[in-house]
Amino acid sequence: MEGRLPGGGLPGTPGPGNPGLPGRGARPRSANPYQLTEESPVYVISVAAQLSGLHPQTLRQYDRLGLVSPDRTPGRGRRYSARDIEQLREVQRLSQDEGINLAGIKRIIELENTVDALQSRLVEMQAALEDAAATLAQREAAVHASYRRDLVPYQEVQQSSALVVWRPKKRSSD
């Protein structure tokens, strides 16, 4: 287990062992602990192997490589979620159908996780920008409403219909 982080992940890979990196990190827990979501770790390795069409040893290898990082029970048993099963199927598809090696698949997964993290950050930043723009508009309206209009005398400008024609003088050198 040399080189692994305390949570079981490999350094530089996303997942529960390294929550600081983009990716799943610590899985969100719902208010109801008995509610199942696609993130709920419910499948033991034998069931996950059947659902993904892979051998259990392949799942262990993928876990060691950091391709799919299932949750762990207190006894260190692996528990796979529906999302993990989909990830296993995608790894298998990329490997068998596309001919991509496991290092390439790992890089693809890391890049997809980074893109997902950046997209969610972009949504957060857009919401913050909209909030800031609304606050700015409110403050600007409050400043305009606070003007004392009685301090500056206002006179209506009379419009005239007079027309002035300008003709330049001719120069003597022409």
Image (cartoon, rainbow, N blue to C red):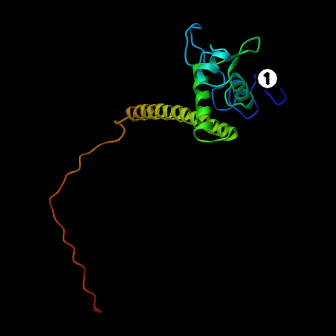
Q: Give the residue furthest to the bottom.
A: 173
Looking at the image, which is closer to me, 128 or 153? 128
Q: Quadrant of the N terminus?
A: top right
Instruction: Quadrant for residue 48, please give it.
Output: top right
The picture places residue 154, in percent across and down from the top left corner, at 29, 43
Residue placed at 31% from the left, 42% from the top? Answer: 153
Callout 1: SS: loop
Q: Give the residue furthest to the right.
A: 2
Instruction: Quadrant for residue 54, please give it.
Output: top right
Instruction: Quadrant for residue 142, please give it.
Output: top left
Instruction: Report whether residue 27 is seen.
Output: no
Q: Is residue 31 above or below residue 90?
A: above
Side (left or right) of 127 relative to 72: left
| Disc 1 target residue | 6
Residue placed at 25% from the left, 79% from the top? Answer: 168
Q: Quadrant of the C terminus?
A: bottom left
Residue placed at 59% from the left, 8% from the top? Answer: 33
Could you tell me the amino acid type at mark 1? Pro
